[in-house]
Image: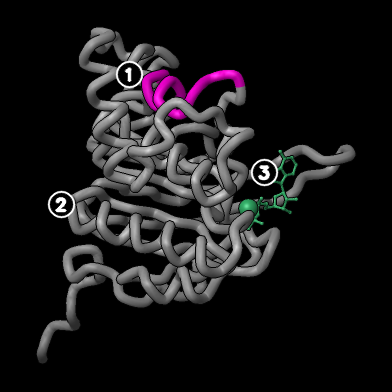
């Protein structure tokens, strides 16, 4: 069953009276439980694709079905609710709030979703333990290392039990060893049933995904390891 089904994605950004063609016709299907890496040179459209797939940025044309919902046909309230409750997003630069503790950062999406305070607290603690930060619950981001901040961001992305997590260069700010620890965590998350779509420059990160989608100049140019039900049907025998 497809969790993402994107068809004919074109994205143009107006630029100095002209247009930048960030996506030039992308079709992509991702099945439930997949672990997909999106790779390709800088500027080829990876972040744009991720944002369009995640319901953050509407395409110029084309359609996205995310978790069975036609994302850009929904009104803004329903689209926000879908993102808040069923999707997680992880950024290269963590995007944590510096004035809040690790636990408070993790609680934020739960508060937005109306989860009661006691339940929020409990779940934030469990999530921080899950990402290996049970001993840093009351620390604020400026007092955490880059790897620790990314773990908090992962815990926050998991707050409302998303079915799919998108990550844009999640190891881009980290040294190699810390990056590997983050990827170990992603692997565990995938083994626990969460679908992952991760944009990465890092070949070590990409090779640990079960499927690599390679982009160049706004197009998917190679798709290795696609799930059988997302692949085209085999040719008919004569
Ligand atoms: P990648 O993540 O692969 O490095 P991006 O998706 O960020 O690539 O960008 C693809 C292309 O679209 C680039 O040429 C980039 O300069 C352009 N682009 C991305 N976002 C914008 C924007 N908001 N306005 C104008 N051009 C943009
Ligand atoms: Mg990018």
Q: Nearer the viewer, mark 3 or mark 1?
A: 1
Question: Do we see residue 73 in this rendering?
Answer: no
In magenta, the rendered stretch is: 99-108
- Callout 2 secondary element: loop
Q: For this rendering, which residue is in front, 121 or 79?
A: 121
Location of residue 111 (image quadrant): top left
User: Furthest residue to the left?
Assistant: 237
Question: Mark number for residue 80?
Answer: none
Callout 3–callout 1 Cβ contact below 8 Å: no
Question: Mark number for residue 1?
Answer: 2
Q: Is residue 20 left or right of residue 157?
A: right
* Quadrant location of the C terminus in the rendered image: bottom left
**Dot placed on the residue nearer the N-terminal end, 2 or 1:** 2
Identify the residue under disc 3: 12
Q: Position of residue 201 (x, y in %)?
A: 58, 66
The CA distance from mark 2 to mark 3 is 30 Å
User: Furthest residue to the right?
Assistant: 16
Q: For this rendering, which residue is in front, 132 or 5?
A: 132
Identify the residue under disc 1: 110
Label 1: few (<14), some (14–19) or many (≥20) C-alpha neighbours in 10 Å: many
Q: Nearer the viewer, mark 2 or mark 1?
A: 1
Q: Nearer the viewer, mark 2 or mark 3?
A: 2
Q: Position of residue 179 (x, y in %)?
A: 50, 62
Question: Do we see residue 71 in this rendering?
Answer: yes
């Amino acid at each position: 069953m497809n969790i993402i089904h994107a068809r004919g994605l074109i994205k143009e950004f107006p630029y100095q009276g002209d247009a930048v063609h960030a996506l030039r016709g992308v079709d992509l299907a991702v099945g439930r439980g997949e672990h997909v890496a999106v790779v390709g040179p800088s500027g080829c459209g990876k972040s744009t694709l991720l944002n369009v797939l995640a319901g953050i940025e509407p395409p110029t044309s084309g359609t996205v079905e995310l978790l069975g919902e036609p994302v850009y046909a929904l009104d803004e309230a329903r689209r926000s609710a879908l993102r808040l409750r069923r999707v997680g997003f992880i950024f290269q630069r963590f995007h944590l709030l510096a004035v809040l503790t690790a636990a408070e950062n993790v609680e934020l999406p739960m508060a937005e979703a109306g989860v009661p305070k006691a339940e929020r607290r409990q779940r934030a603690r469990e999530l921080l333990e899950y990402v290996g930060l049970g001993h840093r619950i009351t620390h604020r981001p400026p007092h955490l290392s880059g790897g620790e901040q990314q773990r908090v961001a992962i815990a926050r992305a998991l707050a409302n039990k998303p079915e799919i997590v998108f990550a844009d260069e999640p190891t881009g700010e980290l040294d190699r060893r810390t990056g590997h620890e983050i990827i170990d965590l992603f692997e565990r998350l995938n083994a626990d049933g969460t679908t992952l779509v991760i944009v990465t420059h890092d070949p070590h990160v990409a090779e640990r995904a079960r499927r690599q989608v390679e982009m160049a100049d706004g197009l998917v140019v190679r798709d290795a390891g696609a799930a059988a039900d997302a692949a085209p049907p085999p040719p008919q025998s004569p």
